[in-house]
Image: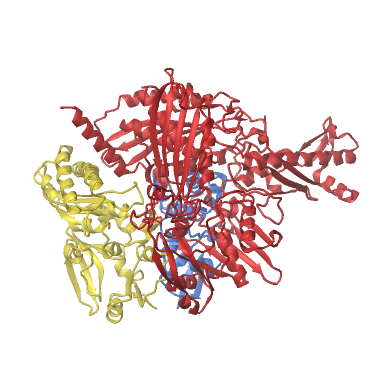
Amino acid sequence: MDYQYIGKDIPVNDSRAKACGQLLYAADLHLSGMLYMKLFLSPVAHGIVRSLDVSKALALPGVVTVLSYENTPDVTYNRGRVRATEEAPDQETLFSRHVRFVGDRIAAVVAETPELAQKAVSLIQADIQPLLPLLTPDQALAQDARSIHEKDGVVRLPQIGYGDYASAQGEEFSHHTSSQRVSHIAMEPHCTVADYKPASDRMTVWTATQSVFGARSAIASILGMPMSHIRVIKTPMGGSFGCKQEMVLEPLAACAAKMTGRPVMLRFSRSEVMLCTMLKHPLDSHIKVKFSPQRTITGLQLSCRLDAGAYQTVSPDYADAISKKLSWVYNIPNVEYHAVSVCTNTPVSGSYRGWGGPECALIMENMMNAAARRFVMDPIELRLRNILPPYATSRINNFSLGNLPLEDALLLGRDRFGWEARKERLARQDRSGRYLRGIGMALATHTSGYFPRRGDWGTVVVKMEEDGSVHVNCNVHDHGCGEVIVFRSIVAEVLSISPDLVDLPEGDTAYNALDNGCYTSRSIYVLGRAILDASNLLLEQLKRNGSQLLGCRPEDLSHRDGALFVTKQPQRRCTYSQIAYYVADKGTEALFVSHTHVPISNPGPAAAHFAEVEVDTYTGLCRLVDYLAVHDVGKALNPALCRGQVGSALQQGLGLVFCEELKLDPKTGRAMNADMQHYHVARACDFSKIDTLFIEKPDEEGPFGAKSVGEACYVPVAPALIAAVNNALELELSDLPLDPPRILAALARKEREKEAVTP
Amino acid sequence: MNFFQPTTLPQLAQCLAEQAGPGCHLIAGCTDFLPQRNGTPWDARALISLVNLAELGQIRQENGLVSLGATCTHTQVEGHPLVRQYFPALAQACGSVGSTQIRNRGTVGGNVGNASPAGDLYPVLLVLGARGVVLSGNQAVRRLPMEQLVLPQGALALEPDEAIIAFELPVPSPGNLNAFVKLGERTHVTIAKISLSASLTLHEGRMEQVRLALGAVARRAFLSSSSSALEGKSLSKALLPELFDALSREVAASIPDRPSMPYKRQAVRGLADDLLSALLHQARDVSQQP
Amino acid sequence: MIINFVLNGRPVSRDLLPQRRLIDVLREDFCLTGAKESCGEGECGACTVLLDGRAVHSCLVLAGQLEGHAVTTIEGMAENGELDVIQNAFVEHVAIQCGFCTPGMIMSAKGLLLQNPDPSEEEIRIALSGNICRCSGYAQIVAAVQDAAKRLREVGKA
């Protein structure tokens, strides 16, 4: 199919403004009379504030007010809740007397300048009675985390699965994987501006959120305001990766605005982002898998433990999400899944790119790679014996996974990466030298929306202006990865007009219909399809009116470059603008379409990743040599942006595997590296060329056949890298991160074991 | 707060005489000063900024000495022909400090003056036999060998009214090789976990007057006794096991209680290997010169 | 104190507290919000500007130290609304996603090309290693800088 705009590398919308530094993010906003808010955080991991002295802070000229648990609503909420009817543990309040981690909110200063707010915070004194901190899930489980929360300190999911693991036949293989606390490090630190007008009781909030309706819901319930009095507007987002999914800043800034009657900006520093928003869950998992003599899986038993941090927030749901993905890649007749989400006196864990998918893949793919070594089998071969065929049904939740080309991904990747040739080359490498190389791979899939879970839909309004340009209204939350330009390209493709003529502002509760927000990689698949359908409806309306104008039947018309023409007599034509004026003059309808799309499928985008790494056995440092990501995207609507997503996935995956970890002092629970000088992420010099191969077998429902990619591409990265390290070192490492000390320690252990066997 | 920006040495001396003491800071590139204060409501009684004192930004050769002004940036030092000619170790160390932006702004005086255990320049200047030139409030100038400039605990051995204004390095004798290698958590933009600096003279194929310094494994970088693993030997990779063994024992002894000790003790092998490579590389270049 | 410096080619004279950071002065006093704060300690590069033609972190320069120096920000790159060669290359190579790192990244690229008009890929990667991008894996950014360097060499100016 030859498209005008779909499949083309069109720059992200606002690229030019971004290149000039003109695009305003939330922290760049300046409202007249705006105040600045700064939090006063708990210095201890667990305690009760006996007394709070804010008098010195209040006495500082320029300080407007101090908020604390003493003068703000004592409403418990769950920061992850998008709609009030969602069941989730309510454990958090705006400010707390019972502080549950180093960084928990006790109070906040609102002042005329950020510097004054900061200074005033340093003048607040809290007398805190320390309580015994429970810093690890083991410590917390021993007493059911009751000292942290009266209720739901520990959430055990009911057993999930199907079949009967115990009766499955075959050789049992056990494996263990764990991973660490990681920060998203979106480049834009969180910022919210709230403006409250007391006379009219109206609140406007500008914030880089993944869900304007979620933010509105939280503010309404905590401050007790009608939703119609609150308007939440999404600002340009400097990256999220899940860190701007939960409602952390919005209720705080709104509360301060309401108390002062003035606009308030709450902007987190990098260290506050790392401590006071969310982190990726520390994960501990044990898996048992039974393999038949043909090395097909007959059963799987998995138990996962998530460290939720001080509040459960989304963690129970997250633990549940891991189970969903267990039946999406391999054909497993019997599955038994146990999970527990444990509160500890540590920073809060929450949404992170992939939502359980990367955790599931980390566990499963580490296990598959380890099993392949045990069976002395090629890891691709082991997978080929176990993968689901196209149009397989997910045994959990019972829905079709779509055309799911797992085999294509494996075979195309094997060829493109030169897997066999590399294997031979590496088998011949000199193992006595300083540097060792290895290759590894991992296979995965992911969601393209919520289906079959209820409550996923997309509502769109498309209208044509008199000059033939188009306005689209849809609850879009672009994280910075380019959804807006892709949506504009979809409209442009349908109507055959330049994407530049399509305006598509993002999430705004005042204008958009209710919608969940940007979760679970649903945007392209669900909202994109809604936009496609709505654009087609507008085209129909144009043709109906155009046929009146041109004196023909609508079906006689074709369209191209902003005009309709009679297919067989192209000289008989009229522009969209002429139709728009015709319709306006007619005065009986508007070129305006409102459409709701409800998805009826949720295909799993298949992905196979292949890595070659080099390990410096003297220092334990690892270097990425080559990387191939094979992605079934259905249709790459904008290949450059798809490749951008893959690069970003690798950026975060390299961090997870090799260097990123928020470390807490094991005695005090205080973060030891909550700043970027001590928390290291991958930089330009850490990358080599990344090869990306797209499989474009169109999905039936996605717009132009597209499936999701943004989270899917992060899912297999870590296990592929780990496998490459293990292949290089002939080891079985699966506790992250594989930082230099851990690698050298493992090599030393191996050396000692070898010495022990050789007399 | 008072802000001073002297443009001549006498002006600097006057500032030091009048302002020095608690609450007064000498600043230049601020690449350590400001990160240390990030997110805190900091204040000072007086700041004396050295960046507009042109004389401190110069590199020149006089009477067998190369003089580096204290506010020369890492970028400036790394690329300077005199440094490249005589002191590859210094060029390597300056080139490995932080990022481009940090190297463009951070200064050699600041790097030594902050006396961080992980500071890259002190051990290099130490093996190169440099002296710090110090100006005091009464306009007197004194010169201190590096080991006297920085105290063993890691603090500067200066009076409050004194400032480092330059470093003087003796022009090396013919046959001198010097190199700097470091190990961080990544290849660039990294803080040293360990660094190794060396200076030696190659005489008839043998290494003499070997000076090695280990950085980031004690409060202050120190001259390493592992130099004996090289002294009098001919330069080759065959020395690796012996050098590694010596360094490893030295690292273990200097930080016996630190959790990072087991790792550093092993990883110093990579540094020893890198050092020998760098020296061999230089020796080849030297022997190819006419 | 009154501080005289050159901002985006124009001499300015302002009464500023000397201990304020350049990034705050730019954003608050001159409404130049292109320089972004992401770490505040010279690690991420989002606040990069040119000081006398060299890339530096505006979060690590004090206002008092500007006397007599020249600052160029991302806003000083485009002329009469026309994007600079580097800015255009970033747009065309789809090297811009969320855009938060972009101004700093472009200023680092500018600083590099002023010093080294014909950098190797390795030199570009090292020069940009002080700027973190979490959205792209850097491939498109490196390609954009390579292309900009080529175009600048063709017209003979950096």
Q: Please identify the quadrant where the C terminus of chain A is shown.
A: top left
Q: Is residue B103 above or below residue A374?
A: below
Q: Is residue A4 above or below residue A655?
A: above
**Chain represented in red:** A
| Residue C48 is at least partly visible in this image | no
A474 with respect to A676 (left or right): right
Give whichever of A264, A684 is nearer the camera. A264
> How many marks are shown on the rendered structure?
0
Q: Position of residue A332 (x, y in %)?
A: 50, 26
Chain B: colour as depicted: yellow
- Direction from residue A644 to residue B227 in the image, left or right: left
- Residue nearest the observer in this picture, A579 or B284: A579
What coloring was used for the rendering?
Answer: by chain
Residue A314 location (% of width, % of height): 53, 48
Quadrant of the rendering where the N terminus of chain A is positioned: top right
Q: Position of residue A517 (x, y in %)?
A: 62, 48
Say whether residue A164 is left or right of residue A293: right
Quick one: B91 or A37, which is closer to the camera?
A37
User: Is C154 placed above or below A276 here?
Assistant: above
Residue drawn at (27%, 56%) of the image: B120
Chain letter, colour blue in render:
C
Q: On the image, which quarter does residue B218 sit in?
A: bottom left
Q: Residue at image x 67%, y 33%? A: A701
Q: Farthest residue in the bottom direction?
A: B18
Image: B240 above or below A369: below
Q: Position of residue A699 (x, y in %)?
A: 64, 30
For residue A7, say whether it is visible: yes
- Please name whichever residue, A295 or B107, is drawn nearer the observer in this view of the structure: A295
